[in-house]
Structure formats: structure tokens, C-alpha cells
Amino acid sequence: MDHLHELAGRVKAAAKELALYSTETKNRGLASIADALEARRAEILAANAQDVAEAEQNGVRPTMVDRLTLTDERIDSMAKGVRDVMALPDPVGEVMETVHRPNGLEIQKVRVPLGVIGIIYEARPNVTVDSAALCLKSGNAAFLRGGKEAFRSNMTLMSILRDALAQAGLNSDCMLLLDDTSHEMAREMMQLRGYIDVLIPRGGAGLIRSVLDNASLPVIETGTGNCHLYVDQSADLAMAVELLFNGKCSRPSVCNALETVLVHQDAAPAFLPAAKARLDEASVEWRGCPRTCALLPGIQPAAEQDYIDEFNDYILASRVVDSLDEALEHIAKYSTHHSECIVTQDPESARRFSAEVDAAAVYVNASTRFTDGGEFGLGAEIGISTQKMHARGPMGLRELTSYKYLIHGDGQIR
Amino acid sequence: MDHLHELAGRVKAAAKELALYSTETKNRGLASIADALEARRAEILAANAQDVAEAEQNGVRPTMVDRLTLTDERIDSMAKGVRDVMALPDPVGEVMETVHRPNGLEIQKVRVPLGVIGIIYEARPNVTVDSAALCLKSGNAAFLRGGKEAFRSNMTLMSILRDALAQAGLNSDCMLLLDDTSHEMAREMMQLRGYIDVLIPRGGAGLIRSVLDNASLPVIETGTGNCHLYVDQSADLAMAVELLFNGKCSRPSVCNALETVLVHQDAAPAFLPAAKARLDEASVEWRGCPRTCALLPGIQPAAEQDYIDEFNDYILASRVVDSLDEALEHIAKYSTHHSECIVTQDPESARRFSAEVDAAAVYVNASTRFTDGGEFGLGAEIGISTQKMHARGPMGLRELTSYKYLIHGDGQIR
């Protein structure tokens, strides 16, 4: 048996045990992890400093280096994140439904873990801790594969997590990190049918596409967000300006940030100059359709690609549309099915937009930035699903579970 | 654009429209279908007679010919099935949860269709009608691909279904049958990312494996059932005999039938001879482990393969085990995660079996034959999922849906 299968076999065996742990046992493991992260921060910082130095030598982009870098505050925040997960209700064992059949059978639908969750991610070492904690609380073993830039940080973090589990009396194989960051090994991992129950890629569009193309396992697509704000004819324009500013400027790098504003032609003459003035405060670059450019002289014209790209930056595409129908067509064509918003005072426009837009989260008069497990009241999240199968939108602990039917009888036959 | 993509594009366009149909509109379509099946039965029978004659000429097995054959009664039963689906509650639009956030946002989780469901099936023409009806009621467009033996029957049925939809004022592209039964075309269909949202194979283990191996789309695995009955030390032996007889003999060809009986060594001397005598009434062939053979002289010895196969026939594998642990190990090794049963009077054995067996349906003292949408109270089912993602166990209308979050605000920003 090769190394990958040996690791995967250990995680799978641990998953069987973990599925039967009580809430108390899992919380004991989480508490031990949080304490260990704080106690062993010097090791984490030392390993991370090596990763950061190497990344800088290799000319890695500063934004990527920033995501890679750990500080005392970020370690505190990882430990706090683990304690937050500890405080969330345990989904496992929840009786979702009970049916009593006329023949006397009692049928219970009971929540169970999925089994082994494979997480493939990039340079952010906090994903190691965060994913492992969510998997543990939901009774799932975690088989992780992080990016090569964060290799030393991740190996150190995982060794701390596993030690902490063992100290608390749990099977340390409930979480494992693949100690090989080659693309070949990642592709082999994506083929581990019978060992991994679901793959969740956490990262940019390139990573997600690579997992979708190479995996022979079920995948939950997460994260890509080409989000639109549609300013209807009847919109409260001051509200629309603030929703646009918040959606575009509060944190442009995240998936629930806005990328394109669509404006009804009747609202455009008043809305666009006011919006431009507000977004100028954050130096947002506009790329507009011809009608936008006519109303906002001096901005760049938008190319087709500008409606496709998730900018993740202070850049905004803008298009004036004739009608709600044209806005709906634009969204149907370019949406990544993440979060979409209409600003309107017309109940019929709101109703149509809600019904016809195919996205995980559809907003009427609120910022798309709210698409988030915490903001939705689910607690921590492992990602935002942009697919319809299994789970859609923010994925919390419940979304990391399946169910089984338990049927009790006294000899019933059919 | 090739023929396959042209068909798939039409189904996808219809799915958008169908997702917005009211319950009344969908039910009008279903009523029209049921009426048309009855009114045009002569066409169906004529097409089917040609399929059956050709199958017989080609030396197709009699059980397969039986599945292929339609009669007046089977047409009545198809029409009744459609009316039963009409009577089921519409899952689409159901508000699953409503959360009011402290910031004033109202977040609703609302059930929506999946989109386009691809069904790949074998020789049973009733699957055409049954799948199309369940998809229609759940707001999903159905893109079907049936086996070549039933080609004329399926084409005739689909033409009747589509005519009936059009007559009732619905878009007839809500359901389409692929008019090419080659394996190449089936494989291309399994790659239609962007057109088909989920593939559900309906048929034997070979079909399901082929879909899993070839599909680049999400698949829901259904149907393979290597089901076990474990007779515990403390079992009521008369009950155990009847549960075995019912599980093995009431309908051996179906997926919830029993294939293997595991018997605790203390129960074996009394249980096995009694069970053998009862199953002799249905001429069941036993294949036993050495300890079974010692207690039931004259039966065949079991080979490893006998514990793996889903016999779908009057054949039973039997093994005597030392303990509940050994039974759990056997089930973990050979189970297809469909339905598993323990017969016991000991609450602790029942508890362990329920917790530790990883299957869609786990029974205590009741027949595995109950794993069925109707018996579970879900109404009609499109299949029994043996996977954990998205849906597990019998899949009714709700299991053919996803959800979206609808968020209403009055200008909230984050």
C-alpha cells in the first residue's frame, strides 16, 4: 500500500470511531486544541516565519504573503475560532423527524456525520485549524491538503492539533495533513473513492476548477462570487448608493462582494453620478457600458470579460438596462449563483427577482455582504456552496452531515 | 451545435420556465398525462409489442422480457401512479426556515427545484412515465435515456407525455427522451455539465457503476442492496424466522430484499434448522459458512463471492458469528449501505447496531422490505439513495429539490 492510501486508511478508520464520540468528548478535543495553539505559539510563529521568508524570496505576491503570515493576533483568533465551534450545538444525533406508521413501525430520521471530508486549500494556514475544528465538531474526520507556500506552518499546526487530540484521549487520526504538496499527489487524493466521502475545495476559482476537473469524488463547489446589484426603476436611490458602496468597498477580496451594478434606464441619470461620487471616496475604478459612459464621462468602457470576472478588487462593472427583464437576463448569463441583490420599492419587482434569480442568496434591499454563516445565524462556516446539490449557501455544521433512518418494530413484515 | 446539445439546451430552457409554474399548472399537466396514457393505450401496446417481439428474437432473458412488457393493467397502473404524484404536496416554495436577525433582516430558506434531472435507465418503460411525473411535480425538467430494448415503447410514451403537456398549456420540453440509445451517446450525456444538474441512474449494479465511472456530473447512487439480517443471541427466534422469510422470499428481485443472514453462535443451533424449514417452503438455496453447514447438513458451502453478491434470487448466504462485534465487522465489510436489520430483545445490542451500522436504513426487529418511499410515508419515490451526500434512503419529491435563501431588508449594510 502506498503512502497516500496508508494515510487515507488511517483517517477512514478514525472516522468510524469519531462518528460515535459524544459531544462532550469532541468538545474536550476542541478545548485541548485551543489551549495547545496558545501554548505552542512560538513553534507556529517560527515555522511560519520560514514559510514567509521563502515566499518573499520566491517573489510571491504581497497579498498572498499577507494571507500566509501568522501573527500573535491571528493565532489568538484561531484559538478563539476553535472555542466558538465548541460552543455551537452538536448536529450529530439530532432527530430530524419521527414518523409513526399505521403498522406500528417507528421511523426516525437521525443526523449522522458524512465520514471523511477532504479539504484542498491554498496558502492560508488558518484554514487548517478552522476546517479541522468544524469537521471534528460535526463528527467527520478531516483529510487536509494545503498549499506548498504554507507547508511548514501547516505541518506544525497539524502536529499541534494531533498532539492535542491524543492528550484529550481522542484518536489523533481524526485529522491528518497530506505531507506532500505536489500536484500529482493532490490529483491522486481527488480520486480516493472509498476513502473520502466529499471534497471541499477552499480557495480561488482556479483551485475550484482544478478540483472539479480532476475529482472522481463528490465535490461541493464553494466560493466563486460574481455578485450583482440591480437598481430598479423604483429604487430608493440613497439606499442603492449605500448598498453599492458597502457591497463593493467594505471588503473587495471576498466572494460576497459586488462586481457589477445594473441600473434601470430611468434610474440611471440620477443614480450613476451619485454612486460615482460615493465610490470615488474609495477610489473605485468604473468600467461601464456605453450608456454608463455617457452619464459618467471619463470612465473606462467595459469589455465582455469585465462582466465575467470576479475582480476581487476596487473595480466595478456597470451596465444600464432597459428593464427588469434585461437585468434578469444579464444575471442569468453571468451569475455564479452566489449572491444577487435588487434595490426596489416595487413589491412585484421584488417578487419576480426573488423567484427568477437562481442563486444561493437573493437579496431585496440589503447588502450581499451578509452571505455568511455567522450573519445567517449558522455559526461558523466551512464555505459558501454555489451548487444546488446537498447544501447551498453558507455551510455550517449541519451542512457537514447526512442522516440515516432508524426503524424500530416488533416483528413487522411486508 | 450537435443534436445532444440541442436537446439538452431545450430541456434547460424549459427548466427555467417550469421552476416558476404554480402547483395548479403542474397538476394540470399531470392530469393531462394520466388521461392521455389511458386514451392512447393502443399506440403504447402496439409499440411495446414490437419491442417485446424483437427482444424475444434476440434471446433476451425472460425476466428482462417481463420487465419490458406492458399490458392494459400496467398502463392503468402507470396512469394511477401519475395521479398519485398529482395528489402529493408540492415541495417547491415551501419555507423551510425563517430567521429574523437582530439587524432587522428577514432570512427565509425556501425550497426550489434542482433544475434538470438526467435519468439513465434500462428496460422498464414504466420508469419513463414515473420519473417524468416525479420530476414535473418537483419542478424539475427531466432528460431521460432509456435502454435500447424499450426504445419504441419509450419513444411512444414520451410523445404522449409531451403532447399531453402541450395540450394542458405547459412547455413540452419539460421532459425529453434521448432518441439515441448508443453507449457513446449515454457517455456524452453523462458529461453535460452546465445542462444537467444531477444524474440518477435507475437499474442494476452494472448500470450504476458505468454511470459513476463515466459521469463528470453529480450522481445520486441508488439501489444496490446487499442487505443483512443479524440474529442476536437474545433474539425472539420465531420473529427472526419470519423476518428472514419475508426479507428473502416476499420479492427477491428488489434492492431491499435480504441476501445474507448472520447468526450469533448461541442462537444458531435453534434458529438455523427452523429457518431452513421455513425457507424450504419457497425452495431457497442456502450457501453457508462451515458452522452453518455443520448445523444444516447437505447445504452448499458459501464462497467469499456469496457474501458480496446481491443475488436478486431465491438464494441466501449464511454465516454463524461469535458476537455482535463479528456481525458488525461482516456488515461493515460487505454492506452496500442500503438496509440492515438486527433481531434482538437486548436494548444495548439494538443501540450499538443502530449507532454503528452505516446504512440508509437500520432496522431493529422489522423487515428490511420496508425501505421504500411509500412505506416511509414519503409518497412515490424516484429511487433509494445509498450515498450520504444530498439525500439518503428513499428519495421522494423533497429529495429532488434544493433551496435558496431569500433575504429582505430595508437598506442594511455590513
Image (spheres, coloured by chain):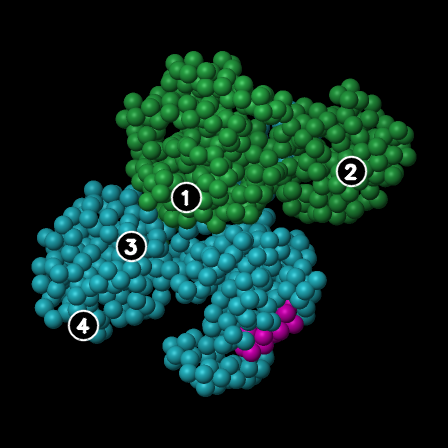
Chain colours: A cyan, B green
Report the residue at 42% width, 46% height from top.
B192
Which amino acid, by three-letter code, is at mark 3? Tyr
Which of the marked residues, 2 or 1, is nearer the chain's N terminus? 1
Say if labels 2 and 1 share a chain.
Answer: yes
Dominant secondary structure (helix, strand or loop) of the stretch shown in magenta: helix
- Contact between marks 1 and 4 (CB within 8 A): the answer is no
Q: Report crowding for label 3: few under 14, some 14 to 19, many 20 or more residues within 10 A (C-alpha).
A: some
x and y percent of residue A105 in the render?
Answer: 62, 30
Would you place residue B403 above or below residue A410 in this image? below
Chain under disc 2: B
Check the residue under mark 3 and report the chain it is in. Answer: A
Looking at the image, residue B263 sits to the left or right of residue A91; the answer is right
Q: Classify B392 as above or below B53.
A: below
The front one of A412 and B303 is B303
Question: Which chain does tag 1 point to?
Answer: B
- What's drawn in magenta, residue-wise? A152-165
Q: Which residue is mark 3?
A: A334
Spatial CA span between label 3 and label 1: 18 Å
Q: Amino acid at mark 1?
A: Ile
Mark 2 element type: strand
| Quadrant showing the N terminus of chain A | bottom right
| Local crowd size for mark 2, using a 10 Å CA cut-off: few (<14), some (14–19), many (≥20) | many
Labels 3 and 4 in the same subunit:
yes
Residue type at numbered disc 4: Asp
**Which residue is labeled 2 in the image?**
B262
Q: Which mark is residue A280?
A: 4
Q: Is residue B283 left or right of residue B77?
A: right
Identity of the residue furthest to the front in this view: B57
Q: In 3D space, how far apart are the residues under numbered discs 4 and 2 (Cα atoms)?
A: 74 Å
For the point 62% across and 33% down, the residue is B255
Q: Is residue A344 above or below residue A240?
A: above
